[in-house]
């Protein structure tokens, strides 16, 4: 007998979920459920996704201490057998060694292709688990329970999975969509303020790249979002998820429009590489300053109103995010080294760098005419060493 797996689980009666955002990808469509106190109800959401009442959880050492027990209890309540693997917390775990350990453990757990692996954590865990799911037995299923603001609004959605390489960030990976995303607003209360600010940078990105009205709203309500005001953070997360879901539905594999979601990333990834992918510079912090540079460079090229670039920089600075090179790492960067790092960006095409630049707030485009010769004096003017 063939068993049908429900890829759109029903919402439990009395659930406090505030919104469900659909990622429309035909037979691979899935829901993002956004609300409060959802982790404790995870078993009700996950059970319909499983071909048998068995799953595994991959998380990190920090999230494991804080949220793993709640998820395990929820699975127990739904009669779901489970096992858990903890990996070291931090960006340094996004490597082949950890990927191999995860794959070996999944095989030891006798995970089958139709089973569903749970990623409980931030972007590192989502990327590692998703990539393992993409390659294990040539493709297994997984779902995302993002525990950081950045993961809830960005990395858990859209199916990008990867590990870092010595030459750059996220250069080795696969597109592999999750079956479901459960975004619990309450887990954000355990995040350090710095992690919240880093996640907020990705929210600002959606306003800056394609929704000026949302950016205007963030200028007024951003502090409420970072203070985790219930209505404000739920609106910001849902709006961000809707924006990303719409773009992913139109361009799943980044053949065109989806590249806009990399606003700030080409600059930002270069700074991450030169600071060693560690605590010196969080991904969201790198994206924040990357957006500042993208808008400043657009204004430098005469394509963007300098006032828009100033507004973006001022808002990010007011939210405690890096808005100048002096605030990034130790503030000392070689301009040529930054350009070489950008040359390994995923968006490089036919050997040419591609940047996401702006005509104004809410109006961005893919630029394929940026040369190292143009970047060098700009980066020096921003504070890099000649």
Image (cartoon, helix red, strand yellow):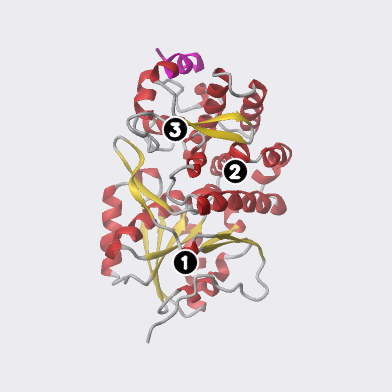
Q: CA distance from mark 1 to mark 2?
A: 28 Å
Could you say which disc has been placed on residue 180 in the image? none
**Which of the two labelled residues, at mark 3 and mark 2, occupies the earlier sequence position?**
2
Decide: marks 3, 1 in contact (CB < 8 A)? no
Magenta stretch contains residue 31: no
Examine the rendering and report whether any part of residue 334 can be seen.
Answer: no
Could you say which disc has been placed on residue 203 in the image? 2
The percent coordinates of residue 253 (x first, y second) are 42, 49
Residue found at the very far right of the displayed protein: 220
The percent coordinates of residue 39 (x first, y second) are 55, 65
| Predominant secondary structure, magenta span | helix
State the residue at coordinates (58%, 23%). Answer: 303
Query: Looking at the picture, does residue 199 appear above or below residue 175?
Result: above
The label nearer to you, 3 versus 1, is 1
Callout 2: SS:
helix
Decide: marks 1, 2 in contact (CB < 8 A)? no
């Amino acid at each position: 007998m063939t068993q049908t797996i429900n890829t759109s689980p029903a919402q439990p009666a009395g659930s406090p979920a505030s919104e469900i955002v659909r990622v429309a990808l035909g037979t691979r469509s899935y829901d993002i459920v956004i609300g409060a106190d959802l982790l404790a109800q995870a078993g009700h959401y996950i059970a319909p996704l499983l071909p048998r009442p068995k799953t595994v959880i991959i998380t990190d050492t920090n999230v494991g201490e804080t949220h793993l027990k709640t998820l395990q209890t929820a699975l127990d309540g739904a009669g779901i057998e489970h096992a858990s693997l903890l990996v070291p917390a931090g960006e340094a775990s996004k490597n082949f060694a950890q990927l191999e350990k995860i794959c070996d453990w999944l095989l030891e757990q006798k995970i089958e292709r139709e089973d569903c692996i749970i990623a409980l954590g931030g972007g590192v865990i989502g990327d590692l688990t998703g990539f393992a799911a993409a390659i294990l037995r040539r493709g297994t299923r997984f779902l995302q329970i993002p525990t950081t603001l950045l993961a809830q609004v960005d990395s858990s959605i859209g199916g990008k999975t990867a590990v870092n390489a010595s030459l750059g960030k996220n250069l080795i990976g696969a597109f592999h969509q999750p079956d479901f995303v459960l975004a619990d607003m309450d887990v954000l209360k355990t995040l350090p303020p710095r992690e919240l600010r880093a996640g907020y940078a990705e929210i600002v990105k959606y306003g800056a790249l394609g929704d000026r009205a949302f950016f205007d709203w963030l200028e007024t309500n951003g502090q409420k979002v970072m203070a985790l005001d219930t209505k404000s953070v739920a609106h910001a997360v849902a709006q961000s998820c809707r924006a990303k879901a719409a773009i992913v539905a139109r361009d799943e594999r980044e053949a065109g429009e989806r590249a806009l979601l990399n606003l700030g990333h080409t600059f930002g990834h270069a700074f991450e590489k030169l600071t060693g992918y560690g605590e010196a510079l969080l991904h969201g912090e790198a994206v924040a300053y990357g957006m500042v540079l993208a808008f400043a460079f657009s204004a430098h090229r005469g394509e963007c109103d300098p006032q828009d670039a100033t507004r973006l920089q001022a808002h990010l600075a007011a939210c405690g995010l890096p808005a100048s090179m002096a605030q990034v790492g130790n503030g000392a960067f070689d301009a040529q080294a930054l350009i070489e790092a950008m040359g390994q960006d995923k968006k490089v095409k036919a050997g040419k760098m591609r940047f996401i630049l702006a005509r104004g707030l809410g109006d961005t485009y893919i630029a394929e005419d940026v040369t190292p010769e143009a970047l060098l004096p700009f980066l020096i003017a921003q504070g890099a060493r000649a």
